[in-house]
Image (cartoon, rainbow, N blue to C red):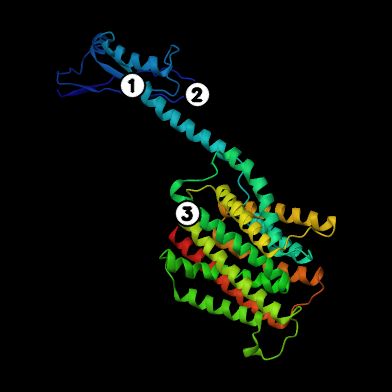
Amino acid sequence: MGDCNHCTPGRALSVEDGVTVVFHKVDSHSTNCNDDRDDDDDDNGDDERTTERIHLQSNCRVSWENDCDAAEGEAGGREDSPEGSEEKTLCPLVCCVRSGLASRDGSAREDSETPKKCSGLGLFYAFLSTVFFSTIALLVKTIQGIHAIEISAIRCFFQILFTMPLLIYHKTGFLGPRDKRVYLVLRGFIGSNAMILLFYAVQQMPLADATVIMFSNPVFTSILAWIFLKERCTIWDCVFTVFTITGVILIARPPFLFGEDRRGIEGNYTNHIKGTIAAFAGAIGAAFTFVVLRKMGKSVHYYLSVWYYAVIGFIECVITVSVLGEWKIPFCGRDRWLLMLIAVLGIAGQTFLTKALQIEKAGPVALMRTIDVVLAFIFQFIFLNRAPTWWSLGGALCVVVSTSGVALRKWYVNSHKS
C-alpha cells in the first residue's frame, strides 16, 4: 500500500495557427489503493478527480469565436464549471504576448521596408553649399564698378524676399522669443558685417587669398568660445591658431618681413593690405557669429536667424552706401542678373549647409568645407587667368591644416563622448 498520484490526461482543443499549452493539475490522494482494483473503479475515480486545464492560445478561440475582451470575461465566468472539470482560459495574457510578438514582427517588416538614408547625403549637402559659396565669391570678383556694400545690400534684399514666406509658413513670427532678441540682433549685425568684409576683400585682393583668410574662422571660433562661453581650450587650439596666423602672414607678406618682394600681388599693394585686413576681420566676425549662434542654441528657428541677418544687413548697407555716395546702377544687364544670382546662391548655400549639419556631424562637414579653398584656386586659375604664388599656396596649406585639425579634434572628442 502506498500513495498514488493520479492525473487524467486531457486532450487540448485545436487552434488554428496557434500553440496550445495544457497544464494538468495533479491531485495527490492519500487514500489506499488496492492493486487488484478493477476497471470500474478506475472509471469512477476519473470522474472524481479534479483536472484544471489552462489553455494558452494565440487567437483566443477555444471552440467558439470570441475576442480577447470577451475571453477575459469567460476566464472569470468559467471558474464555476461542472464538477470534476475546472477549466480556465487565459486569453488576455496570451493576447498581450502574441500582440507584442506581432508588433515586433510588424516593426521589423516596416524597418525592412523603410529605405535607409544615404550615408553620404549630409556630406553631399555640405559639398553643394561649398560650391555655391565659392561661386558667389567668383561672381563678386567678376562684377566691376559696384561697391561691395551695394552688392551686400542687394543680396540682403533678395534674401528678405525669400525668407519672409518661409517665416509665415513655419509660423515663427518676425521678432522671435523675447529673451533671444538681443542675440538675434547681434547675430544679424556681426554676420552682415562679416559678409561685407568678405566681399570687399575679394574685390581688393586675389580670390584665393581672400577665401583662405576667411576660411580661418573655425580656429578663431574655438578661441572666442573659450573666452565668452567658457568652453575648454587645449594646447592644440593654440597650435592651430599659430598655424592660421602664419598662413595669413604668408599670404599678406608684410614689407617688414618680406621686404619689397611683391610678386604675384594683384594691383596696388596698399589695396592688397586693405583686403587682407578686411578678410581677417571678416573671419573674426564670422567666428563671433558662430559663438552667438551657440549661445542662442536650438530654441530659435534657423529662418528667423537668417531673417535678422538679412534685415539688419540691408538697413546697414543702405545707410552706409548712402553716406558714401556709392549707389551705382550696373553697367549692363549681365551684371544685374549676376547680382540676383548671388542672392539666390547665398540662400541655397545656407540652406544646404544647415541640412548638412542636421544630418551629418559637424566635424565631417567642416572637413568638406575645406574644398572651398581648393575651388577658389581652381576658379582663380580658370576664370581669372591668375596662377597662385608659392607664398599663397604655403599660406593656404597652413590654414587648411589648422582648420582641418580643429574639425578632426572635435570629431574625435564627440565620438568618444557618444
Q: Amino acid at mark 3?
A: Val
Q: Is residue 199 left or right of residue 105?
A: right
Camera-nearest residue between 10 and 260: 260
Q: Secondary structure at mark 1?
A: strand
Q: Which residue is mark 1?
A: 54
The CA distance from mark 1 to mark 3 is: 70 Å
Q: Secondary structure at mark 3?
A: helix
Camera-nearest residue between 273 and 232: 273
Q: Which residue is mark 3?
A: 182
Q: Secondary structure at mark 2?
A: loop
Q: Position of residue 388 (x, y in %)?
A: 75, 78
> Mark 2 against mark 3, which lies toward the viewer?
3
Q: Earlier in the sequence, mark 2 or mark 3?
A: 2
The CA distance from mark 2 to mark 1 is: 18 Å
Q: Which residue is mark 2?
A: 17
Q: Residue 218, relative to residue 84: is it above or below?
A: below
Q: Amino acid at mark 1?
A: Ile
Give yes or no for contact between labels 2 and 3 (Cβ–Cβ under 8 Å).
no
Give yes or no for contact between labels 2 and 1 (Cβ–Cβ under 8 Å).
no
Q: Amino acid at mark 2?
A: Asp
